[in-house]
Image: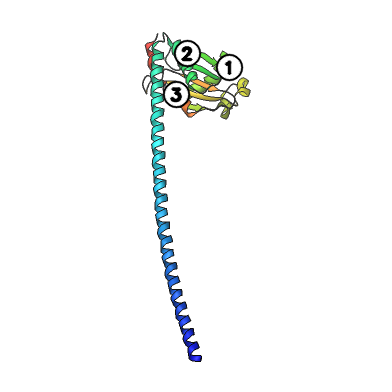
Amino acid sequence: MTKAKDRRLRGMYKSARKENNTLRETLTCVRNIIENTERELEGVYAHLEATQRELEDKDTHAQNLQNRLILTTLKSEYLETLLSSKDNDDVFRYTFDFFTQNANPGAYFGVGVAANEEGTGLRIIGCFGIPSPDSQRFCTHLISPLIKKIIQNPQVLTDKPEEHPDKFDPSIGKYLPGISMLQVPFMPDPSKLIGGIYIYKKGEQPITEPEIAIASLFVRPAGIALLRNP
């Protein structure tokens, strides 16, 4: 009876060990499958990320090309507009109108400056505005302190007069907050500044990147037009 019982116990033990070994092999196989699957998924994710980056790069490139095409078209239209100018007043007025027609909708103001008779500096020659320009007095007080800057640094630049109010006449101090300005030099060549235009907005309306890009189209064509016209 005892021997038979021992044999049964041995048989059960061997069977249990066999089942345990089989289970271990199964678990090992499952772990290998999981690890391989995770590696495959990592590869898939990496491929997806690379594909996404590639698509984003292509989208960026396409957008850049589209922006360049838009600016090239605008430049061609601006040059055509300047061809119809009969004098320097037309150059300033056409430039301001062209900007406002192609920038974001809203109220814009402008002040034109041109070389003085002595050729030693710039003088204010006119004010522009949509719906209407500011007074000559206001334009003079706003722009006169900035002329030195455009002479020293003739580039398309943005400015916020409220950040340096001490430069301006105290009578316009209360009007400075909220003004955003764009300085646009007119230069037939990189070493010759013969005029420019200041375009500004009120009411905390910032100058945008597209507006800067549009203004940058004016620099050389407007300078050439000022030289050409009487």
Amino acid, disc 1: Phe
Position above or below: 26 against 154: below
* Disc 1 to disc 3: CB gap under 8 Å: no
Question: Residue 14, relative to residue 38: is it above or below?
Answer: below
Of 71 and 14, nearer the camera is 14
- Measured Cα–Cα span from mark 2 to mark 1: 19 Å
Judged by depth in the image, the label closer to the viewer, 2 or 1, is 2
Question: Looking at the image, is mark 1 or mark 3 earlier in the sequence?
Answer: 1
Residue 222, how many percent across, how many down? 41, 17
Q: Nearer the viewer, residue 95 or 223?
A: 95
Give percent across and percent down for residue 97. 48, 16
Please tell me which of labels 3 and 2 falls first in the chain.
2
> Mark 3: few, some, or many residues within 10 Å (few <14, many ≥20)?
some
User: Depth check: 102 or 38 in front?
Assistant: 38
Q: Mark 1 or 3, which is nearer the eye?
A: 3
175 on left or right of 158: right
At 61% from the left and 23% from the top, the residue drawn is 173
What amino acid is labelled 3 in the image?
Ile
Going by the numbered disc 2, the residue's amino acid type is Arg
Q: Which residue is mark 1?
A: 138
User: How many labels were placed on the picture?
Assistant: 3
**Label pair 3/2, CB-CB below 8 angstroms:** no
Tag 2 residue: 93
- Residue 45 makes an appearance in the image: yes
- Residue 133's spot in the image, x, y percent? 56, 15
Across and down, in percent, residue 55 comes to: 40, 40
**Image marks 2 and 1: residues in contact by CB distance under 8 Å:** no
Secondary structure under badge 1? helix
Which mark, residue 214? Answer: 3
Q: Is residue 226 visible?
A: no
Q: Quadrant of residue 195?
A: top left
